[in-house]
Amino acid sequence: LAKTTQPISMDSYEGQEVNITCSHNNIATNDYITWYQQFPSQGPRFIIQGYKTKVTNEVASLFIPADRKSSTLSLPRVSLSDTAVYYCLVLSGGYNKLIFGAGTRLAVHP
Amino acid sequence: DSGVTQTPKHLITATGQRVTLRCSPRSGDLSVYWYQQSLDQGLQFLIQYYNGEERAKGNILERFSAQQFPDLHSELNLSSLELGDSALYFCASSARGTSGTDTQYFGPGTRLTVL
């Protein structure tokens, strides 16, 4: 299983762009990179998923370089409501079980 | 709202007791997953069911068991409860659960407190 490493915490201000980088050096050919967001006492919420290059949806963008050993979640113009824990996961194997790390605790300040 | 429902929302019980947590997946989803989130262990995968059959097992204790019924709802049974079992228990569902791209949708969780 590919292990992920991401910063424990980050701080930002409203209106700024936030980039959270995750490293996954042992990612396998068939693995996908997925990001989840979790607010206190709520279930994780799927944000975005990608395999390579760039993926964008209405919430975020995901940048994956050619070697796929890292990925960057980009949140444009964050607001106070984006304060949450963000988890980077690599989906391995055929059973789709999610292995959560410690995540990145993002604090957005006014 | 993810479409996944869990009951009860809160549960307070005593050590040694047994409880049952219930999960209804999103309409059409065949896979159900159970996760435990405690302060010291983070989010941990417990078990997955696909269309009524156990498909994958994680760090689930022998005191814990689960099943998925023909209508696809699932129950997680926790017995001989200990103080350390106090945690948030999340259920998630996905359409299939057989592919790395299958998105999991999480329910609101059940907060279990063992006194």
Image (tube, coloured by chain):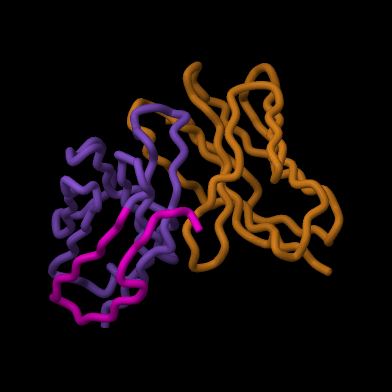
Chain colours: A orange, B purple
**Residue at 52% over, 27% down:** A32
**Residue at 65% over, 18% down:** A67
Position of the C terminus of chain A by quadrant? bottom right
Question: Where is residue B115 drawn, in percent x and y?
Answer: 26, 83
Classify residue B65 by image quadrant: bottom left
Position of the N terminus of chain A by quadrant? top left
Question: Where is residue B60 drawn, in percent x and y?
Answer: 24, 51
- Seen in the image, is A71 located left or right of residue B27? right
- Whether the magenta-drawn stretch holds residue B60 is answered as no
Question: Where is residue A38 drawn, in percent x and y?
Answer: 55, 57
**Residue at 26% over, 62% down:** B22
In the depicted structure, whether residue A66 falls above or below residue B94: above
- Whether the magenta-drawn stretch holds residue B20 is answered as yes
**Residue at 24% over, 47% down:** B72
In the depicted structure, whether residue B102 falls above or below residue A53: below
In the depicted structure, whether residue B16 falls above or below residue A51: below
Question: Where is residue B108 drawn, in percent x and y?
Answer: 43, 63
The span picked out in magenta is B1-24
Depth check, front residue: B28 or B107: B28
In the depicted structure, whether residue B47 falls above or below residue B79: above
